[in-house]
Image: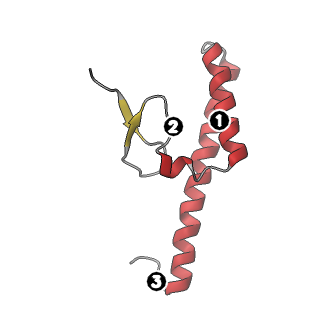
């Protein structure tokens, strides 16, 4: 039996995850709780009727916000490390 996977949706993450997940656990834990709930609620709503454009757009919007939140958190970590160490790229 073949398991179908895709890359984690977080920027530059190459981890392979099952199709029913948006991100690997490392990145999903970085999504703020209210935004994670928004993604899950939008996913449930969209799964009821995938032909409803409004539901699909709400899901896509929630996903984009989650990916952006993870990206911003990763950038802040890099910037904080650079401020502490005095070098941006090590």
Q: Position of residue 54 (x, y in %)?
A: 70, 21
Query: Which of the 4 quarters of the picture holds residue 66?
Result: top right
Number of numbered markers: 3
Q: How is the image coloured?
A: secondary structure
For the question of whether residue 58 can be seen, the reply is no
Give me the residue at 49% from left, 46% from top: 25
Q: CA distance from mark 3 to mark 1?
A: 36 Å
Mark 2: few/some/many CA within 10 Å (<14, 14-19, 20+):
many
Per the image, the residue denoted by label 1 is 39
Give me the residue at 69% from left, 38% from top: 37
SS for dot 3: loop
Per the image, the residue denoted by label 3 is 87
Residue at the far left: name it.
Answer: 1
Label 2 vs label 3, nearer the camera: 2
Report whether 39 appears left or right of 22.
Answer: right
Query: Which of the 4 quarters of the picture holds residue 64?
Result: top right
**Is residue 80 depicted above or below 8 in this figure?**
below
SS for dot 2: loop
Q: Position of residue 8 (x, y in %)?
A: 44, 42
Q: Which mark is residue 22?
A: 2
Ranked by sequence position, the earlier of labels 2 and 3 is 2
Ranked by sequence position, the earlier of labels 1 and 2 is 2
The answer to whether the residue labelled 1 contacts the one labelled 2, judged by CB atoms less than 8 Å apart, is: yes
Q: Position of residue 53 (x, y in %)?
A: 66, 19
Q: CA distance from mark 1 to mark 2?
A: 9 Å
Query: 23 or 9, which is in the foreground?
Result: 23
Give me the residue at 70% from left, 36% from top: 38
**Is residue 46 depicted above or below 61 in this figure?**
above
């Amino acid at each position: 039996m073949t398991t179908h996977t895709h890359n984690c949706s977080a920027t530059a993450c190459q981890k392979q995850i099952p199709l029913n997940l948006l991100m690997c656990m490392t990145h999903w834990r970085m999504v703020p709780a209210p935004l994670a709930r928004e993604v899950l609620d939008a996913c449930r709503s969209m799964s009821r009727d995938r032909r409803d454009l409004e539901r699909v757009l709400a899901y896509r919007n929630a996903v984009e916000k989650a990916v952006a939140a993870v990206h911003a958190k990763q950038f802040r970590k890099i910037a904080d490390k650079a401020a502490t160490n005095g070098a941006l790229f090590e």
